[in-house]
Amino acid sequence: MVLAACQSGNGGEAGTEGDKAGESGGESKTLVFGRGGDSVSLDPSRVTDGESMKVAANIFETLINFGEQDTTLQPGLAKEWEASEDGLTYTLELEEGVKFHDGTDFNAEAVVKNFERWANGDADTFPYYQSMFGGFKGDEGHVIESVTAEGDHTVVFTLKRPQAPFLKNLAMTMFGIGSPEAFEADAEAFGEKPVGTGPFKFVEWKRNDSITVEKNEDYWKEGLPKLDRVVFRSIPDNGARLNALITGDIDLADGINPSDQATISGDDNLQLFERPSLNIGYLGMTVTREPFGDKLVRQAFNHAIDKQAIIDAFFEGAAEMAKNPIPPSIPAFNDSIEGYEYDPEKAKELLAEAGYPDGFEMELWAMPVPRPYMPDGAKVAEVIQKNLADIGVTAEIVSYEWATYLEKASKGEADAFLLGWTGDNGDADNFIYALLDGDNIGSNNYTYYDNDELHDILIEAQTEVDEDKRNELYAKAQEIIHEDAPWVPLAHSTPLLAGSADITGFKAHPTGSDILSNVDFN
């Protein structure tokens, strides 16, 4: 995916002050949202990237919602729900009178068809379904026994075993409910022309430039959305995106460099937004590629990399050093673990012990786009390259367009790669199981790390409904991961966004899926 820079104008869709000034005269309210990369697909169940979710969250709706700026459970397409005492049955009562964008009815049967579609898939088609529900129909680990409709507005989920984060999983953007008529007619085209029940309807996708959505005039929540149109524009360069905001070519921008905070704060025409931190940026090492099958090498890398220098140089204090694969905002975070200290001499000793006293040559993959957990992957890679040179390791930096980068890394083709994760539901399971369990090799576990003891603990933690006991299990899981060191955890960032001063109602969500139905202009 070649990411083009901003093209101002774009048929009058640039969200200029002239557009907004004319609102009282009947012109439409258009918000132009500048972002670092294009979406991969607009069918959220088929992808794992945040840029796809950012748009999909406004086209699709989930059965359960999160809070405005947290991961508390709130009514969504389901107005209420009840769990059985044994944790094996969930009964959801659905909203009535809701329509998909194609005019068909949202009902219990539509929910069943969505889950049947996902359950009958595979890791290539629906990677996130595998990560969150333990596999697909017929797989031993698949947690969902059945999804049935009881009348038009009641859905019953029956599980094979309790799954503590089940309701939070249902609230994740990737399980937005789509129109069965649309995806049954053409499953492949559904990612290009999505049909949901959300506040905005899909209009147009100009690859590597912009995605346009418009107000759903038949939206079931009265008075929403307040905007008539949203244009998501791809502007890969952070500086160019900020300039587009300053000149009024766009109205809202994410991926703001921490070093630009002062510029924004000093401009009366702009305002700064902080996204609540729920992320991890990391260097992953593919354990199926030598020499990264040796944990001594992986531990050496953890000692070799100067995390604090990276945070000081590229995060300007808007991040904290990482030592675990989950952020401190998650209750299961194990603070008793002591992170690997920056110690090049110790790193050299470990490499020598592993049989590499003179180091080795490798490829270091750097992200081509800014991400919330890492504003500038290319520059971070340069620091890591120098850190590795200090211990005798020669790292060649390589990169690919974003969609190709993700696809190749997921297939285990990288020696070591920069990546990260923004949590989808606020649960430790969504980080540790999704990213580091053997079940998810080929989907979200790009390191191909597989530890049987860890797997047993993670499945037990999923099944356990007592939160204190779950936290104890995750504490042990973090100890195992710390010792095995498949990652170098780098930083937990506080992502920054900026917008025009006259924007109201925007709430940056910790998951990165910002729902824009309440956004308006003064």
Image (cartoon, helix red, strand yellow):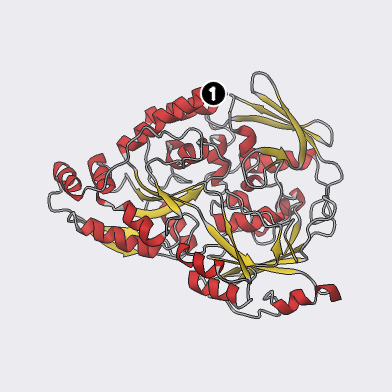
Q: Is residue 67 left or right of residue 216?
A: left
Q: Is residue 362 left or right of residue 517?
A: left
Report whether residue 24 is seen. Answer: yes
- In the rendered view, would you say 457 is above or below 277? above
- In the rendered view, would you say 470 is above or below 268? above
Q: Nearer the viewer, residue 414 or 303?
A: 303
Residue ID at (41%, 51%): 411
Query: In which quadrant of the rendered view does residue 374 lie?
Result: bottom left
Q: Nearer the viewer, residue 451 or 233?
A: 233
Q: How many marks?
A: 1
Q: In which quarter of the image is the C terminus?
A: bottom right
- In the rendered view, would you say 210 is above or below 425? below
Residue ID at (47%, 46%): 444
**Residue on which disc 1 sits:** 464
Question: x, y (%) of residue 489?
Answer: 37, 46
Q: In this view, does 457 lie to the left or right of 356?
A: right
Question: x, y (%) of residue 100?
Answer: 79, 52
Query: In which quadrant of the rendered view does residue 437 lie?
Result: top left
Secondary structure found at label 1: loop
Question: x, y (%) of residue 485?
Answer: 32, 41
Residue ID at (51%, 34%): 331
Report whether residue 237 is seen. Answer: no
